[in-house]
Image (cartoon, grey):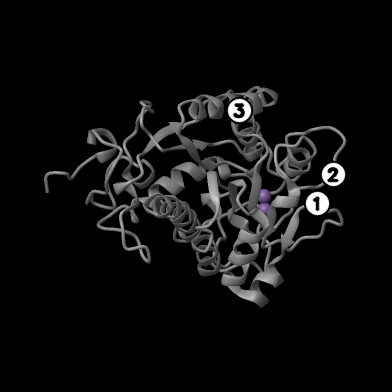
């Protein structure tokens, strides 16, 4: 029982899982140590509780809290299924807390998010970020581009988020149009998965829409994504509305006909051949959630990403 209690404060190491009681304690992601000491850290988790770019129902600003809470139920005991190992045995992961910004000056927020990401990436760690609405991925990609150059984007969503506009606005439906045009990502080596809304322009992105996923299955999706990305460095962005509303009601812009939780998890588990340098999980809006199922799906997808990284490291 010696390691029980407030691991987020009391742990002195970024490694290992504990046995903290699931329904109590400080809610860091996966009971990681809250820390701003990034020496030797592999992955730094942080939240960006910004949802001003939302077009429909707001509330994703509360996503990081909800995901941290749901993750406490995954941070108990040994390794997660089906991996059979503790990803934190080899990966040093801390929870940095949330990105600071002035909500009263929304036009300044993108630069504040980019500066936050730039500071964390300068430590040599990669980032695992909780939104917030999907707009936050745009300033994150700017910071990534400064360090890594153009990345392949692996993008799960009901929506393309590439709708054309003349002038860059703070909108969670247009940022990948700008990201592609600015060269932050390489659309030819990127793929969008689970789409089921209409946009006549692809802007060069490869698309495996929701029907393609349903007809071909998770294994084929994983193979196709791996083929498209090849050996490029890649960034994984998961809009939780890629899932069907019955698996993820807690989101601002739900669309029927989406992926099941098991399909999304199964696809992610099939991406072990890809060199990911970052991930975000966005659009969890807990006010519309039922029984925390959306937040739990988000937390589990994030944990599976960490398991992918740990498995690559273990060879
Ligand atoms: Mn989106
Ligand atoms: Mn979406």
Q: Which residue is mark 2?
A: 164
Q: Residue at x 79, y 33 (%)?
A: 168
Q: Which numbered disc, 3 or 1, marks the residue closer to the eye?
A: 1
Relative to the observer, which residue lies in front, 57 or 68? Answer: 68
Indicate the position of residue 53 as horizontal and vertical percent values.
69, 38
Dot 3 lies on which element? helix
Decide if residue 41 is on the left or right side of residue 165. left
* Residue 103 picture location, percent across and down: 60, 27
Name the quarter where the C terminus is drawn: bottom left
Measure the C-alpha gap from mark 3 to mark 1: 25 Å
Q: Is residue 131 left or right of residue 10?
A: right
Q: Which of label 2 and label 1 is nearer to you?
A: 1
Question: Which of the 4 quarters of the picture holds residue 165?
Answer: top right
- Can residue 25 be seen at all in this image of the molecule? yes
Quadrant location of residue 55? top right
For marks 3 and 1, the one nearer the N-term is: 3
**Tag count in the figure?**
3
**Alpha carbons under labels 2 and 1: distance apart:** 13 Å
Q: Reply above or below: 13 against 242.
A: above
Image coordinates for residue 141, horizontal then vertical, percent: 64, 36
- Disc 2/disc 3 C-alpha distance (Å): 22 Å
Q: Are marks 3 and 1 in contact (CB under 8 Å)?
A: no
Q: Which residue is mark 3?
A: 114
Q: Residue at x 65, y 34 (%)?
A: 149
Which structural element holds mark 2? loop
Q: Is residue 244 visible?
A: no
Q: Horizontal placement of 213 versus 264: left or right?
A: right
Q: Which mark is residue 90?
A: none
Q: Where does the image place residue 127, in percent across and percent down from the top left? A: 49, 38
Viewer-nearest residue: 101 or 183 = 183
């Amino acid at each position: 029982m010696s390691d029980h209690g407030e691991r987020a404060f009391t742990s002195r190491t970024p490694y290992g899982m504990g046995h903290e009681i699931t329904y109590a304690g400080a809610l860091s992601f996966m009971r990681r140590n809250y820390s701003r000491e990034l020496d030797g850290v592999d992955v730094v988790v942080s939240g960006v509780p910004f949802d001003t770019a939302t077009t429909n129902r707001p509330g994703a600003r509360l996503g990081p809290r909800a995901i941290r809470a749901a993750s406490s139920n995954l941070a108990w005991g040994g390794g997660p299924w089906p991996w059979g190992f503790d990803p934190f045995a080899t990966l040093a992961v801390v929870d940095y807390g949330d990105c600071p910004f002035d909500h009263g000056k929304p036009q300044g927020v993108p630069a504040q998010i980019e500066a936050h990401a730039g500071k964390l990436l300068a430590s040599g760690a990669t980032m695992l970020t909780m939104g917030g609405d999907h707009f936050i991925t745009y300033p994150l990609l700017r910071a990534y581009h400064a360090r890594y150059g153009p990345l392949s984007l692996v993008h799960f969503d009901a929506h393309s988020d590439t709708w054309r506009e003349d002038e860059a606005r703070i909108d969670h439906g247009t940022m990948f149009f700008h990201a592609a045009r600015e060269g932050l990502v390489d659309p030819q080596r990127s793929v969008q998965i689970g789409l089921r809304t209409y946009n006549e322009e692809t802007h060069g992105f490869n698309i495996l829409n929701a029907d393609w996923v349903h007809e071909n299955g998770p294994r084929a999706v994983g193979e196709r994504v791996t083929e498209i990305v090849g050996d490029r460095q890649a960034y994984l962005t998961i809009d939780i509305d890629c899932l069907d509303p019955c698996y993820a009601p807690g989101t601002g812009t739900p669309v029927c006909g989406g992926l099941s939780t098991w399909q999304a998890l199964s696809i992610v588990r099939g991406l072990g051949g890809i060199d990911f340098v970052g991930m975000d999980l966005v659009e969890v809006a807990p006010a519309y959630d039922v029984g925390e199922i959306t937040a739990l799906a988000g937390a589990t997808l994030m944990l599976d990403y960490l398991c992918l990284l740990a498995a690559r490291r273990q060879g």
